Image (spheres, rainbow, N blue to C red):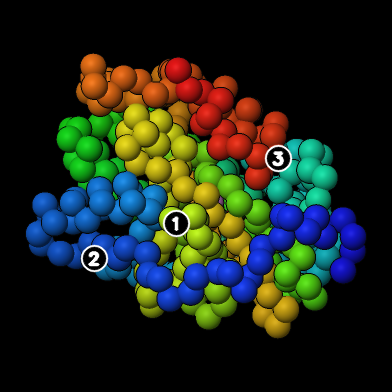
Amino acid sequence: MPGSYVRPESQRPRLAEVVSGAPIPVVDLSSTDRAAVVRAIGDACRSHGFFQVLNHGIDAGLIAAVMGVGRDFFRLPAEEKAKLYSDDPAKKIRLSTSFNVRKETVHNWRDYLRLHCHPLDQFVPDWPSNPPDFKETISTYCKEVRELGFRLYAAISESLGLEASYMKDTLGEQEQHMAVNFYPRCPEPELTYGLPAHTDPNALTILLMDQDVAGLQVLHGGKWVAVNPKPGALIVNIGDQLQALSNGQYRSVWHRAVVNSDRERLSVASFLCPCNDVELGPARKLVTEETPAVYRSYTYDEYYKKFWSRNLDQEHCLELFRT
Ligand code: OGA
Ligand code: NI
């Protein structure tokens, strides 16, 4: 394995110490008991920062098609993919590798295609036209995942005692980004990461992952816990912006992706991101005399630039925005 991917001894994933078989919370969105769904989501956001949703309304055939075009894209000849390569995080469509090759000292065992997805008509023309069904399949999925995200916002807002429309309204005309992550087989998974420990800088992430190949791990109770999703489930996690909005009640939890030696792995992450220029920070209603503001106010533009200027596994980026 090339030396530029090898982590120093103290930073390695220690795969033998990972907890397996500790399920992360599951929420069935088809339940007619709305209060119970809201409560379950609130509890999960507080305790794990991660949960899986079942009966989320996105068709299983569409999900299989998304994974299919994702795989087909990464199987294209290198010369074809190279046309899309860029290491500039400001680009609205790019194929890249690792995390931020301009800044980092050790690389990660990952390639990824990053797309901006809203409004679709502005970005889709620049998406890959090969595989031929890429644009249509991914756009359909993007629309559905956005709707699901807004339904989750309503439940999360309510679980904090806010108006159901609070998040959708205060986060502004949301940007939506996608990362199609491809983790090739790796000769020495003990020495490297697909993605090292990080928190997501955006508001909410909805992750579609390989049903057969594990790799996502979440920090819970000081231990790394392997996430094995239930069949048909999507994984949801709170990003830094919802931790800030909840005034620290909900947690944007550290997570990482590890690789393995016998199978490649694909995941498709959809990121809902606040509008660049709205004011972010704790919801006013959640700031009281007993619970003073933990974070100052700022814009996403300021936050995002700070996030990409660092290494992925440095301190929690929100720490830099404390009052
Ligand atoms: C991400 C992420 C995890 C995975 O893209 O931010 O955490 O399992 N991905 O690919
Ligand atoms: Ni992530």
Where 302 sits versus 98, above or below?
above
Q: Nearer the viewer, residue 84 or 290?
A: 290
Helix, strand or loop for disc 2: strand
Distance (Cα) linking label 1 and label 3: 22 Å
Mark 2 neighbour class, 10 Å CA radius: few under 14, some 14 to 19, many 20 or more: some
The relative height of residue 201 versus residue 259 in the rendered view (above or below) is above
Camera-side residue: 3 or 264?
Answer: 3
Q: Which mark is residue 28?
A: 2
Residue assigned mark 3: 311
The quadrant in which residue 229 appears is: bottom left
Front label number (3 vs 2): 3
Quarter of the image where one finds residue 291: top left
Q: Residues within 10 Å of mark 3 (few under 14, many from 20)?
A: some
Q: Is residue 9 left or right of residue 173?
A: right
Residue at position x 70%, y 40% in the image: 311
> Is disc 3 placed on a helix, strand or loop?
loop
Question: x%, y% of residue 166?
Answer: 25, 31
Q: Could you say where residue 74 lies in the image, as x and y percent from the top left?
A: 70, 67
Q: Amino acid at mark 2?
A: Asp
Taking the view exactly as shown, the residue that stands out farthest to the right is 3
Lower sequence index among marks 2 and 1: 2
